[in-house]
Every structure is written in C-alpha cells, then in structure tokens.
Amino acid sequence: MIKPSITNKLYNVKNLQRRHNDIRAYLFLAPAILLAGLFCWYPAIKAFVESFLTVNQSGKILGFAGFSNYRILFSDQAFLNSLRVTIIFVVLFVPLNTFITLLAASLTRRKSRHSHLPEYVFFTPVAVSLSAYSVLFRELFRGKASVINRLLGLSGGWITEPAGAMATLVILGVFLDFGIDYILLMCAFRSVDRKVIEAARMDGAGGWRLFFQVEIPMIRETVLVTVFLALKDALLISAPIIILTEGGPFRSTETIMFYYYIEAFKSGNRAVQNALSSLVMSFAAAAMGIYSLRRRRAG
Amino acid sequence: MKVQRRPSDMVKFILRKVLLALLALIVVFPLLYMFSSSLFSASDFNEIRIIPDVPQWSNYAKALTDRYFPYYMINSVGTSLLASAIRTTIIILAAFALTHLRFRGKNLILSALVLTLFVPQEAVLYHNYRTIAALGLIDSWAGIISTSLFSAAQMLLLMGAFISVGKDPYDAARIDGATDMRYITSVLIPQTAPAVMTIAIQTLITVFNSYLWPLLVTNRPKSRTIQIGITMLGFSESGQLGPQMATLVIMTLPFLILLAFAKKWIENALIRR
C-alpha cells in the first residue's frame, strides 16, 4: 500500500518540477511569442481569411466571397499595370545590381596598401538611409535641368518621363542594396582559401580563368544570397517610390507594393488589400521554401 | 612566387585601377553632392551648380533651428535606442530558453518563431496598422517600435552563438546556485558579446532608418521621425533645399563616422580564415 503512494508522490514532485521548468521557459519566450503572434501570425492569418470574405470599409464581415476578391484584383487595370511595372523593375534591377556589386567586390578582393579607401567608399551606402538617398536622387535626377544631365551632357527628363523615372528608380535601387551586397561579396572573396588560389596559379590558371573557374564557384552561395535579397527587395519595393516619384509619371513606377500602399491606406479598398497581401505572402513563402530546401540540400 | 610582368599585364593593371576609381567615384558621388549642396543658396540649386558659389553656412543654423527638427531627432534617436535595447533583450531571453532549457512544445514554439521569416512585413502592413490604431498607439514611440521588437533571423544568429558556448558553463553555474538571469548577464552575454553587439547595432540602424512604418503610424509633425521629416522639409520651395541637405548631412555623418570604426569589426566577423 505504501509503495505506490511513494512512487506516486515522487512522480508528482517530478511532474511538478517539470511543469515548473516548462513555465520558466515559457516566461523567457513570452515576449517573443507575443510579438510574433500579434504582428506576424495574426495579421497574416487575418489577411488570408479575409481575402475570401466580403469586408466593408470599417472592417465588418458581410459574408463569404469565394474568389471574387481575387477576381476584383485581377480585373483592376491599375493592378495589372503594377504587375508589369514590377516585372520590368525586377528584370532591370536584379542583373544590374548583381553585376555592379560583383564588379566592385572583385576589384577589391585582394587586400593591398591602398585598398582601404575604396573599400570604405563601397561600405558607405549602408550608413545612408533609404529616405536620404531618395531625397538626394529626387534632386540629382529632378528633370531636364538636373545635375546628372549637366555632368554627363545628357538631356533626358529623368523622373519627369516614364522611362527616365524607371531608370532613376533602378539606379536608386542599386545604391540602396549596394553596401550590404558589397560587404557580403567582398568578405566572401577574402574567405576563399589562399591555398586553392595558389594551387590554381601553379597549374597555370591566371586572370580571367582563375576568377571565373576558381573564385566565383567558391563564393557561389554568397552570390546566390545577394541575388535572393535583390529579388526580395525588388518585389517589395515601395518606400523609395513614395518619396521619389509617387508612382508617376502616368503610373510608370507604380509597383505592386506601391499599389498596395495606395489601395490599403489611401483608398481603403479592403478586397484588393487582403487579396494582394495573401498573394504576396504565398509567393514569399514559396520562394523562401524553395530557397531553404536548396540550402539544406547544399549544406 | 613572383608574377612575371608583361606589357599586357601592365595595361590590365591600369585598366583595373581606372575602373575601380570610376566605380568608387560613382558610389560616393551622391554623398559628395550632399555635402556640397548643404552649403548651396537657392540660386546654386537653380543654376545647377556642383560647388556652391558662396558657401551658405547658415543652412546648418536653419536646419538646427527648424521648428520640428528637435522633435524629429529626439523621436528618431529615442525610438531606435529603445527598440535596440528591447529587441536585443527579448531575443537574448528567447534564444537562451531555446538553447539551454528543456520544456514541452519546444519544437512547436521554435517553428512558430522561425516561420515568421516567411511573412514579409510589407505584406501585413495594413492589419498591423489597424492593430496599432486599435491599441491607441498612433503617434507614439510604442507605435513606431512595436512591430520591430522581434526578429527571427537575429534570434537564429544568437542561438548559434549560444550553442557554441556549450552547456558545461551553464551546468556549473546551476550547481553553484546561480539563477538563469545571473548566468545570462554574467556568463552568456560577455561570452557572446560580438553577436549581441551585432544585433543591437543592426537594430539601431534599421529602426533609425525605417521610413514606411513610422510614416503610417504618425500623423502629428511632433511625433514624426527624422526620416519622414527630411522628405517633407522644403518639398516645394527651393529656398528650403539647402537646409534640407544640411539636415541630411547632420543625420548621416554620425553613421559614416561609426562605419569607419565598424568596418574592421564587420570584416572580422564575416571573413573566414
């Protein structure tokens, strides 16, 4: 009779201690869980669920909507235009950004006595804020009578013309991502084992061959990270547009996230806002999923 | 090993240096223009000068005495310092629990936190705005910082650092009767100082530089941060452009100086030897 009660008691003490340990751990995690729940999971689920409901301006649910919110979104010419603009931006920005940052990193990949200054210069964009660069570009590219035209002897209208505004936005995008990409790539180049490079040199590989067949493959993972970051930034770009062009001229720089900003915060269009939120989240989740699967397989 | 120098090597060498100089000049040009134009008069802007005709040092006085400048600056510095301190603390606590403690539902909680990486903040702006409005936090520091108080990416970074410390010091500290908090503050943080500092500085810069979120959750000029402020100063009249550029210099220069010192740390952290 006694034995079971002792083990029972011991079991209870152990259980109590375990529960105590659990509660302690939950207390440590509570702020993180609360924040992730309130500002990530709650809005994500809310947007997803509401994208299938009819919701009025003040947030009241009026009924089930099926896919009609998505149909409204895809029949809006402004949205289709913003899709087109975003694709053009991605196609122009991602290759240019990758090329320029790789060029800068490869030109400074060997440490030398005088490499400090160019390296610092290439680091500086991380210290300059998005709105600072946007304000500067608004002035530098302000139109026909602009600093850039005067310096380069050009006569284009830049932010006052559709093509020029897109060009300005692409260049601004490169400046915004340049610093962090350069830091990652330059450090990756310098992490390549010297022995591998010396061995390749011994085998007679030099110059271009050494660069393309030895060094670039060795930093492939970092290049992929920068391309992935560039893609993400390009698909989600909106703040620089708010400052630089406000989507114009003639909606020529109205990307999907700028369109989202206008519809959600200026027009109060709940249908479009929720549907677009869900689409962007699904796309991001798919992209992240593919990326992390790839990484797992690679490493 | 001495590399033999042929004439074509010399040409390549010079070409490389010219290309490097050109690229560096392009990258630094907007900053040079920022410094130069912070001394411009209205006519310097109108006549598209690169160097001011007569340097207008009064632009700095005008920038500093702008009615809202002190508010912008206090809001920016205050929110970024506060967010940095709170976020770093929250991440330290979470990373500690996930690496050092055993408890039920650990994997579930870890997944729920890490999977937030899959939701871009830009896509949930509207509902987060509604939450902040419902909590009555519009025009407050709490409203500006509350969505940036957690980062799964940084938590993973810190968990990696905590794991590398190992569990032996923790077990030893427990036997000596030290509490978890004491262990975190006197062993774990000093041992992983570079990672903790990286997180704190990264958060500081991110929050100081953020634009869209503070724009959405502030209405009164006095509640705005400097990033919003500079886009609104001198929007129309070119007479205000000089002081606006001076404001840009004032808010950018500290970070340029910080970067000159931080460059070495960043390289040490990222270059594997």
Image (cartoon, helix red, strand yellow):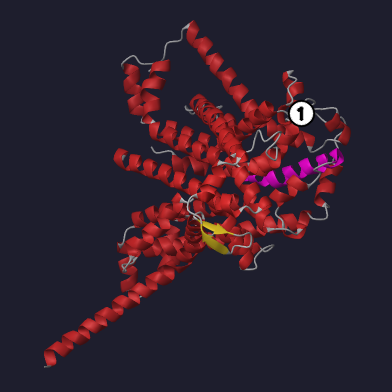
- Residue sitting at the far top: B7
**Residue B248 at x, y = what percent?**
73, 43
Identify the element where label 1 is drawn: loop
Chain holding disc 1? A
**Residue A195 at x, y = what percent?**
33, 27
**Res A219 quadrant in image:** top left
Residue B68, compared with residue A247, is above or below; it is below
Q: Is residue A288 magenta?
A: no
Residue shown at 66%/33% (left/top)?
Answer: A252
Judge left or right: residue B67 versus residue A120. Answer: right
Q: Is residue B243 magenta?
A: yes
Determine which residue is flagged by label 1: A143
Nearest the viewer among A50 and A292 is A50
**Residue B42 at x, y = what percent?**
87, 36
Residue shown at 33%/61% (left/top)?
Answer: B107
Nearest the viewer among A81 and B160 is A81
Residue B197, compared with residue A180, is above or below; it is below
Image quarter (top left, top right, bottom left or bottom right) of the N terminus of chain B: top left
Judge left or right: residue A58 versus residue B189. Answer: right
For badge 1, the amino acid type reads Gly
Residue A72, compared with residue B91, is above or below; it is above
Q: Which residues are magenta?
A: B237-258
Nearest the viewer among A30 and B157 is A30
Judge left or right: residue A97 versus residue A165. Answer: left
**Residue A72 at x, y = what percent?**
56, 46
